[in-house]
Image (cartoon, rainbow, N blue to C red):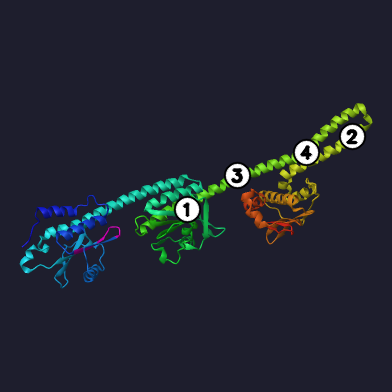
Amino acid sequence: MSLTLDQRQLETLSQLLTAGGHHDVAELLGTALERLVAFWPAHAGALIYHTPHGDVVHLERGPLDDETRALIEQARTGFGRRVDGSKPTVGYYTLGDGRDVLELPLQSSGQGVGLLHLVVQDQPADKADAHPLALDEDLLILLVRAVGGEADKLAMLRRAERDLRELHLLYEVGQSLAMNLDLASLLNDMRRRVPEVVGAERCSIFILDDERHELMLDLPEEGRSLRMPVDRGIAGWVATHGIGQIVNDVEQDPRFYDGIGREVDFVTRSIVCVPMRVKDRVVGVMQLLNKRSGEPFTDQDLQLLNTLAAQAGIAVDNARLYQSLKAERDRLLSKEEEVRKQIARDLHDGPTQGVAAIAMNIEFIKRLLTAMPERVPSELETLSDLVTKTSHNIRTLLFELRPLGLETQGLLSTLQQYVARWRDPSGNNVQLRLEAPPNVPRLPHEAEAAIFIILQEAVNNARKHAKAGEVTIYLYQEEGQLVASVRDRGKGFNLAVVEASYETRGSLGLLNMKERARLIGAECRIRSAPGEGTTVELRVPLA
């Protein structure tokens, strides 16, 4: 005999099948399982549900002993979401102690999506028609399909809401990254926004320092930066191998390094970490730490972070390029100002004083014409010498600023003229020599101009700082290269110390020479040591 549901049962079933007001699928199915256990009635129940997106929900209500749990686990073995157009059937297992385990497959749109197990008391024969299995079969189908269907609807609704939220955050983060060219501000913005995408507690962004082989973590709120070797920690592994990683229990991963966490007083439990790339080059690492919900990081979190890291890598590279261009602009402006001051000093110390002396001599000769005319011829001779010297100084200054013969006569001839015109304005009587064969090959004008400027800079540095009596310029061909060098036997200096102090001293000399060399595809080598003099060597490919 079949039973139909009375009004109370229909109301209970209606409550059981509605998804309204439930926050997520686990909450919906938990409520459904509780009501099914009470509605049947059953001693306990267990449910497994496979979402349309590959997640699995496991739920239990009531006490399950080891025998019952083992039976349920065996029944679930190999189960997965699959197309199932057959009519649902009820599985029936006897435990042997007066209890039965009922198995009801959950369905949604023709797919098997889960299994429901209820532990019920076996009914005596005289009460068999009161057993829930005696329910009308159509009502049973309605039950299992409705629970699975409502779960699918809610799962897809929540996933759509999450996807929309993530897309909105991705758009906001992308807009922020695209508009921000200040590296420090960009990193701050990413640290603030990226954790929102997957609900993480913290975001760490390491920038790769290729020269020092280190990962740098900026801590603007503390006014400091932390560094670690590029091969240390999970972040270092990701930077080295270029492969994203999910580690949901860092204590079980031998790669985990907690030195940074101790420095910032943060306890890391789980990590999702991805490389930031520009084309095939890793420029940094982005990692999220600890989900606020306590759940593990998922493959979807990894995929999302990879999407963000792809944008972030380009943004970081653009910001660094902008920062580099800005620094280069500032260096050029500083160099221009330095050149202006040097020209002003040279004009003041040389031609300006010469012209002033000429003017004074002319006025003196005017007075001599009436007072002592016999001295005029000798004073005119002195004036003529002064005019010649001043003219030479002006021509030398113009030559040093822009040697006109460089384009027509070449580098060797220009250097010969430079040495011939050499004067030591410091008064230290530094002698300048040139050693070069007569057949030095020509280079394009731009390359020869850059070489001349670099050699001139090296000579001036030697004159100012080396305290050497003699400076020699060498020019020759060797192994398909044009080699140009300046050597002095002065006091020398500690090259590493000088190069390390560029940022604090604002010095541009050696750095400027190396940059000019790179622009023409040349290599600039500088060798120096205290007491051993200095050699600046430039090697320019001839081919």
Three-letter amino acid code at disc 3? Asp
Q: Are marks 1 and 3 in contact (CB under 8 Å)?
A: no
The quadrant in which residue 437 appears is: bottom right
Cα separation, mark 4 vs mark 1, equals 55 Å
The residue under the point 20% across, 58% down is 34
Whether residue 373 is visible here, answered yes or no, is yes
Name the residue type under label 1.
Answer: Gly
- Whether 161 is drawn above or below 379: the answer is below
Label 4's element? helix
- Give the x, y percent position of residue 382: 88, 37
Crowding around mark 2 (Cα neighbors within 10 Å: few <14, some 14 to 19, many 20+) is some
Q: Which residues are magenta?
A: 44-55
Residue designated by label 1:
313
Upstream in the sequence, badge 1 or badge 3?
Answer: 1
Looking at the rendering, which quadrant does residue 500 occupy? bottom right
> Cα distance, mark 4 to mark 3?
31 Å
Q: In terms of secondary structure, where does tag 1 sit?
A: helix
Residue 323: x and y in percent read 54, 47
Residue 383 vertical position relative to residue 448 in the rendered view, above or below: above
- Please check the rendered image and state whether residue 9 is part of the magenta-colored stretch, yes or no: no
Callout 4 amino acid: Pro
Looking at the rendered structure, the kind of residue marked 2 is Glu
Give the mark nearer the N terminus: 1 vs 2: 1
In this orientation, which residue lies closer to the viewer: 316 or 473? 316
Q: Earlier in the sequence, mark 3 or mark 2?
A: 3
Q: Which residue is labeled 3 in the image?
A: 330
The residue identified by callout 2 is 379
Disc 2 secondary structure class: helix
> x, y (%) of residue 258?
46, 61
Asked if marks 1 and 2 touch (Cβ < 8 Å), the reply is: no
Residue, disc 4? 351
The front one of 108 and 502 is 502
